Amino acid sequence: MSTPSQTVGPFLSIGLPWEDGPDVVAIDEPGAVWIRGTVFDGEGEPVPDALVETWQADAEGRFDHPDDPRDARSRDFRGFGRCPTDEHGAYGIRTVVPGALPGQAPHIDVSVLARGLLSRVVTRVYFEDLDNDGDPVLAVVPAERRATLIAKRTEDGYRFDVRLQGDGETVFFDL
Amino acid sequence: MVTPAPQRLALPKYRRDPDGTHPPLDSPDYRSTRLRHPKQPLVLMPQRLTEVTGPLLGPGRLGEHDNDLTRGRDGEPQGQRIIVTGRLLDGDGRPVRNSLVEIWQANAGGRYRHIGDRWPAPLDPNFDGVGRTLTDDDGRYEFTTIKPGAYPWKNHDNAWRPAHIHFSVFGTAFTQRLVTQMYFPDDPLFAQDPIFNSVPDEKARQRMISRFDLDRTEEHWALAFQFDIVLRGREASVFEEEEDDDE
């Protein structure tokens, strides 16, 4: 029987941030982009004590993981990013845009943890300048809410804000 | 759509936890949930490759004494020295091996080393309150630390958090990511704590309470508590994900 989830509380920054947490790829990685955004609460105020974690395939759409049955060889791609929000609620993850997966548009899975969240909330980042047609996860999201999952192109990458509650509330998933 | 070469993928699938295992995101007694819980219903997500894989974070994340929170400073921290051991398991009792376990906690006086913690208990110059380790081949982990103190907070009148240690674990799949809190047996503060009590199922709540472990105490040195962490299990059968044949 599973152990219950509990909140990370207000002091997660003691234990969870890593110096290289935001660096899914090295600074000189070809095609590196920044995914930046702000986490907002139900009154539109920034959330300064959240943690954003990301998990994704590499640029070829492969995971360095034994349960990716397509390729056993290690690719040495961490695939994981984590960044606490700053006093303005902002986070940033430096990564590469993942390749498409079988039958799915390129995407990044995201967890948001914070004081006031008794479990993490889970969402997905898609990319506005890529082809998202036919993606089976977007397809189960009500059409009028899909835009909350689409990151917008910026000068150095993409912008993906998270709205925990209220107007424009981000779509969160039950896994 | 860009799609790799056609193939059939055999993927594991992770079971859902029974209702009442985890707290509802909207838990009004814990006031900080008010503006932070989603009001729209969660969308049921089909588990695909991204969800059944996950970060496998290994030795590169550890420093030499990261599982001993009583070391690393010039002197010994104040408080009751304790050993915390346990196993990281999946829902079928299988050990989760070589997996990162991260903890953080208040000091013996209930004070966190954090700019936002201002209650008038002393900081301990010899205690940072952060630890990490990897599970071994049996899924076992072990920390040496100090028993954290209870501390007051402003959730309701005369509110106190029961003593606890924060645990963060990954398992082997994105679906298994878990952050929880380990509590201590027979804490009189449980009854008034909305975070502990946010878990609806009584038996599930009990799984967050560590067990005093006389066998693991060290004579003349440290008390011991045992805390197993159980993550979601896999379905008995794998399913096949049909490949799109559009390339």
Image (cartoon, rainbow, N blue to C red):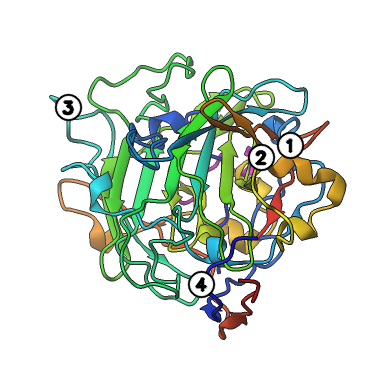
Label located before the other in sequence (2 or 4):
4
In the image, residue B203 sits, relative to residue B197, either above or below, namely: below
- Residue pictured at 17% horizontal, 46% vertical: B221
Q: Which residue is mark 3?
A: B73
The residue that label 2 is drawn on is: B194
Query: Where A112 falls versus B5 (above or below)?
Result: above
Which residue position is annotated with label 1? Answer: B29
Asked if the residue under mark 4 is in contact with the one under mark 1, i.e. CB atoms within 8 Å, the reply is no
Residues rendered magenta in the picture: B185-194
Q: Nearer the viewer, mark 2 or mark 4?
A: 4
Using a 10 Å C-alpha cutoff, classify the residue at mark 3 as few (fewer than 14 neighbours), some (14 to 19) or many (20 or more).
few
Label 4: chain? Answer: B
Q: What element does badge 3 sit on?
A: loop
Q: Residue A107 location in percent, x, y?
A: 59, 51
- Rounded to the nearest whole Å, what is the CA distance between mark 1 and mark 3? 39 Å
Chain letter of mark 1 equals B
- Tell me, yes or no, whether dots 3 and 2 are on the same chain: yes
Q: Residues within 10 Å of mark 1 (few under 14, many from 20)?
A: some
Q: Secondary structure at mark 4?
A: loop
Residue located farthest toward the front when viewing the structure as drawn: B247
Q: Looking at the rendering, which quadrant does residue A65 occupy?
A: bottom left
User: What amino acid type is highlighted by mark number 4?
Assistant: Gly
**Nearer mark to the viewer, of 3 and 4:** 4
Up/down of B188 relative to B171, above or below: above
Could one spot residue A9 in this view of the protein?
no
* Disc with the residue nearer the chain's start (3 vs 4): 3
On the image, numbered disc 4 is attached to which residue?
Answer: B91
